[in-house]
C-alpha cells in the first residue's frame, strides 16, 4: 500500500463516529435521573476493572509495588479527590519503592 492517507482517514472515521453519534442523538433529550446516575458510574467501573486486572497480572517481583501504588493512589483520591493527583502519587510511590528497594 503506497498511500496510507485513505487508511488513516478511514480509521479516524470509524473511531470518531461511535463517539459522535450518541452525542448528537442525545444532546437535545433529557435523560431519566436513574439513567444519568448510571452513566455517572461508568467511568469508575471501567477504571476499577482496569486496575483490578493490572493488580492481578502484575509480574511476581512487582506485586508489593503495585499494591503500594494502588494504596497510595486510593488514599490520595479519598483525601483530595483529584484524578491527576492520585495517579501521580501512585506513580511516584511505585517509582520510589522500585528505585530504592534492595
Image: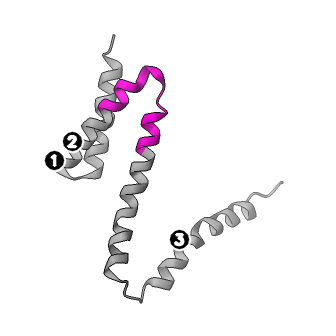
Circle 1: element type: helix
Q: Which percent across, then down, holds residue 70? A: 32, 37
In this view, the residue farthest toward the top is 102
Q: Look at 40% across and 51% down and name the residue there.
A: 47
The residue that label 2 is drawn on is: 75
The magenta stretch is 51-68
Residue 23 percent coordinates (x, y): 47, 78
The answer to whether residue 39 is magenta is: no
Q: Name the residue under label 1.
A: 79
Q: Most prominent secondary structure in the magenta stretch?
A: helix
Magenta stretch: residue 66 in it? yes
The answer to whether residue 43 is above or below residue 64 is: below
**Residue sitting farthest toward the right:** 1
**Dots 2 and 1: beta carbons under 8 Å?**
yes
Q: Is mark 2 on a helix, strand or loop?
A: helix
Say which residue label 3 marks.
Answer: 19
Where residue 96 sits, quadrant-wise, is top left
Crowdedness near tag 3: few (<14), some (14–19) or many (≥20) residues, C-alpha within 10 Å: few
Between the residue at mark 1 and the residue at mark 3, the CA separation in whole angstroms equals 33 Å
Pick the front one: 44 or 22? 44
Q: Residue at x 47, y 41 (%)?
A: 53
Q: Is residue 80 left or right of residue 34?
A: left
Amino acid at each position: 500500500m503506497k498511500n496510507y492517507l485513505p487508511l488513516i482517514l478511514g480509521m479516524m472515521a470509524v473511531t470518531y463516529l461511535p463517539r459522535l453519534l450518541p452525542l448528537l442523538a442525545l444532546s437535545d433529550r433529557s435523560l431519566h435521573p436513574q439513567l444519568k446516575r448510571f452513566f455517572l458510574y461508568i467511568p469508575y467501573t471501567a477504571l476499577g476493572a482496569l486496575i483490578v486486572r493490572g493488580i492481578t497480572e502484575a509480574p511476581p517481583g512487582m506485586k508489593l509495588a503495585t499494591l503500594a501504588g494502588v494504596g497510595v493512589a486510593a488514599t490520595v483520591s479519598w483525601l483530595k479527590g483529584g484524578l491527576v493527583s492520585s495517579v501521580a502519587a501512585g506513580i511516584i510511590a511505585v517509582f520510589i519503592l522500585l528505585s530504592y528497594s534492595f
